[in-house]
Image (tube, helix red, strand yellow):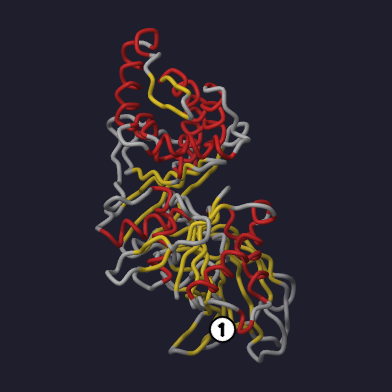
């Protein structure tokens, strides 16, 4: 069995591929509402405990797991990859083949599998119980690169704070699980979304004095007005507005942009029609396929990747090279050594080493004092950006295979491996690899 797992703030969602080439949620004990397996006790406080228990429950009910995709926020990729390795290290055979996948890549994998996603920049918003996350992603043929991302919350959590404020206005408590469940059930009632959207538009355009008292929710017999909903939503909207602008500004080096990039919203809080109401009407929306629950979008995309139905396209789209120096025919000359071709580096994958004629190239560091070198990044259009410089120590007589490793969090490392396997790899951090070479110069 090949599955994807998405561990949230309060529940775990699991999905697997279906015979028709799509993906479906996998039911686990306690998942009676379609919101995933509830976290409780130790699993609510430990991501590793939640992963361990989920893996055990899936295996106990459905059999061995061969390939596992774990969907996580982009800024947690490195930490979660290390934690997942600890969870599976002691299992017989090393456990399943594990691949970490950032939420934006998983969501775009779902969209790409079900229809063409045009090349260009796309904005993925993940609105959860604790925080909002936005990522600007550059999509080209076969590749998806996160250009910029960020996360933000409000006191008490994002969705949690919204739910808390609504329940308080109804005289109920977020701390009581039955009250939370009743609020969730109220949101799922037929006609609630349409009623709220109409009331919100009227209250916004004509004033809350006229339409603010319109009842839009009933929870355990208590009425909640559109004024209460809009007041509770405002801090959430403010936090998401500020975050979205920070991410877009970071991607453009501070240059202003308009809202032209296609937007897709996922996560539990995006179920609210207020998420649609919050964005301007001119915003281009990338719609999820069919009746996809936005809270399941990321794990459904991850399941497609786990089943091999689509490549997430998260390989680095540019080539990397290093400037070398040598002697030919008695003359000193310089050349570029291609270390990693385009689309060869996979986050969390093994190092890619420079080759010539199908064999790894042997190099040595410059004799004498330590040498400063720079790694070049080259796009298909010829644009180049230089990383570094790195200071490499002199190692007389030692020859290496030179390579690059891309960590799960997107940071790169230059790898020098002794050509005679006489010692361990030596790594030099390069930092995050640029998604674009625009504005760079040699």
State the SS at label 1: strand
**Taking 367 as reference, is 247 left or right?**
left
Residue 64 versus residue 435 in the image, above or below = below
Q: Work out whether residue 57 or residue 367 is closer to the camera in this orientation and state it.
A: 57
Query: Please, which residue is most extreme toward the bottom here?
Result: 420
Which x, y percent locates residue 11?
Answer: 54, 52
Q: Count all numbered tags in the image, as a single digit.
A: 1
Which of the 4 image quarters holds residue 426?
Answer: bottom right
Q: Work out whether residue 248 or residue 279 is closer to the camera in this orientation and state it.
A: 279
Residue 440 visible, this angle: no
Residue 237 versus residue 311 in the image, above or below = above
Q: Work out whether residue 437 or residue 41 is closer to the camera in this orientation and state it.
A: 41
Which x, y percent locates residue 315?
Answer: 44, 66
**Residue denoted by label 1:** 327
Residue 212 versus residue 268 in the image, above or below = above
Residue at image coords 52%, 65%: 100
Which x, y percent locates residue 143?
Answer: 37, 63
**Taking 53 as reference, is 393 left or right?**
right
Query: Please, which residue is most extreme toward the top here?
Result: 209
Q: Work out whether residue 1 or residue 189 is closer to the camera in this orientation and state it.
A: 189
Which x, y percent locates residue 408?
Answer: 56, 64
Disc 1 packing (10 Å; few <14; some 14–19; many ≥20): few
Residue 243 visible, this angle: yes
Which of the 4 image quarters holds residue 227?
Answer: top left
Query: Please, which residue is most extreme toward the front here?
Result: 221
Residue 266 versus residue 412 in the image, above or below = above
Residue at image coords 45%, 76%: 1
């Amino acid at each position: 069995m090949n599955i994807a797992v998405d561990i949230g703030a309060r529940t775990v969602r699991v999905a697997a591929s279906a015979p028709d080439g799509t993906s479906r949620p996998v039911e686990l004990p306690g998942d009676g509402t379609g919101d995933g397996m509830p976290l409780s006790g130790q699993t609510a406080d430990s991501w590793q405990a939640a992963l361990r228990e989920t893996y055990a429950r899936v295996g106990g009910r459905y059999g061995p797991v061969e390939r596992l995709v774990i969907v996580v926020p982009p800024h947690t990729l490195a930490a979660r990859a290390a934690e997942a390795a600890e969870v599976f290290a002691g299992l017989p055979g090393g456990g399943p083949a594990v691949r970490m996948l950032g939420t934006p890549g998983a969501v775009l994998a779902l969209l790409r599998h079900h229809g063409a996603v045009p090349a260009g920049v796309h904005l993925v918003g993940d609105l959860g119980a604790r925080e909002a996350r936005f990522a600007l992603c550059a999509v080209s043929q076969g590749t998806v690169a996160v250009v910029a991302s960020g996360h933000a919350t409000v006191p008490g959590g994002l969705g949690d704070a919204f739910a808390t404020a609504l329940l308080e206005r109804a005289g109920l408590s977020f701390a009581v699980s039955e009250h939370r469940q009743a609020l969730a059930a109220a949101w799922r009632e037929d006609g609630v979304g349409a009623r709220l959207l109409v009331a919100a538009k009227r209250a916004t355009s004509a004033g809350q004095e006229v339409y603010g008292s319109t009842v839009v929710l009933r929870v355990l017999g208590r009425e909640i007005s559109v004024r209460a909903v809009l007041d509770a939503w405002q801090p959430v909207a403010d936090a998401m507005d500020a975050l979205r602008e920070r991410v877009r500004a970071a991607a453009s080096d501070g240059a202003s942009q308009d809202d032209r990039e296609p937007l897709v919203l996922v996560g539990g809080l995006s179920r609210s029609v207020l998420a649609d109401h919050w964005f301007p009407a001119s915003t281009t929306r990338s719609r999820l396929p069919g009746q996809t629950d936005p809270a399941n979008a990321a794990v459904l995309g991850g399941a497609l990747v786990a089943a091999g139905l689509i490549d997430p396209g998260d390989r680095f789209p540019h080539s990397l090279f290093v400037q070398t120096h040598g002697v030919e025919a008695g003359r000193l000359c310089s050349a570029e050594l291609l270390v990693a071709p385009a689309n060869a580096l996979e986050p969390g994958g093994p190092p890619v080493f420079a080759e010539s004629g199908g064999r790894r190239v042997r190099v040595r560091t410059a004799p004498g004092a330590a040498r400063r070198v720079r790694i070049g990044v080259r796009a298909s259009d010829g644009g180049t950006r230089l990383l570094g410089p790195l200071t490499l120590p002199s190692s007389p007589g030692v020859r290496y295979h030179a390579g690059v490793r891309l960590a799960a969090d997107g940071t790169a490392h230059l790898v020098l491996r002794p050509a005679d396997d006489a010692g361990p790899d030596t790594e030099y951090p390069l930092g995050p690899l640029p998604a674009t070479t625009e504005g760079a110069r040699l």
